[in-house]
Image (spheres, rainbow, N blue to C red):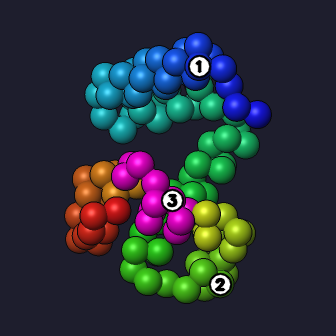
Amino acid sequence: MKRPASQTDNANDALDALAEALACLQGRDDVRAFLLDLCTPAELEAMTDRWRVVPLLLEGVPYREIHSRTQVSVTTVGRVARTIDHGAGGYAAAIRHSHPELHPGDT
């Protein structure tokens, strides 16, 4: 269901506040602690599953092989691949900083 404009503005403001909180953290240990406090175990598992497949996709590993290596569903692998190609560019920015050898291009 589409949110009314005022709720969408509030959601955008909240997302901006969360992004600012993440940007203010200093180092991996702070980010890890924040994520552990913020997310449920299921949310953390879903996010880490998605992140684990990103480098494999950028290396050109086939979806089914990624599933075999990681046990992440082929559906999730496909969703991550679509997001790499058509998302907001967050995966590309993170890969640029964490795995510059992968050169994700202009995704």
Circles 2 and 1: CB distance less than 8 Å?
no
Q: Quadrant of the N terminus?
A: top right
Mark 1 residue crowding within 10 angstroms, few (<14) / some (14–19) / many (20+): few
The magenta segment: 80-90
Mark 3 secondary-structure assignment: helix
* Disc 2: which residue: 64
- Residue 87 is covered by the magenta coloring: yes
> Alpha carbon of mark 3 to alpha carbon of mark 1: how far?
25 Å
> Residue 17, located in which quarter of the rendered image?
top left
Q: Quadrant of the C terminus?
A: bottom left
In the image, taking residue 29 as reference, residue 62 lies left or right, namely right
Q: Give the residue type that dot 2 points to.
A: Arg
Q: Vertically, is 11 above or below 41?
A: above
**Disc number for residue 55:** none
| Frontmost residue, 60 versus 25 | 60
> Alpha carbon of mark 3 to alpha carbon of mark 2: how far?
18 Å
Circles 3 and 1: CB distance less than 8 Å?
no
Foreground label between 3 and 2: 3
First in residue order: circle 2 vs circle 1: 1
Decide if residue 17 is in sight here.
yes
> Residue 38, located in which quarter of the rendered image?
top right
Mark 2 residue crowding within 10 angstroms, few (<14) / some (14–19) / many (20+): some
* Disc 1: which residue: 5
In the image, taking residue 90 as reference, residue 50 lies left or right, namely right
Mark 1 secondary-structure assignment: helix
Q: Give the residue type that dot 3 points to.
A: Thr
* Disc 3: which residue: 83
Q: Residue at x 63, y 31 (%)?
A: 39
Query: Residue 95 at what x, y percent from top left?
Result: 33, 58
| Frontmost residue, 49 versus 11 | 11
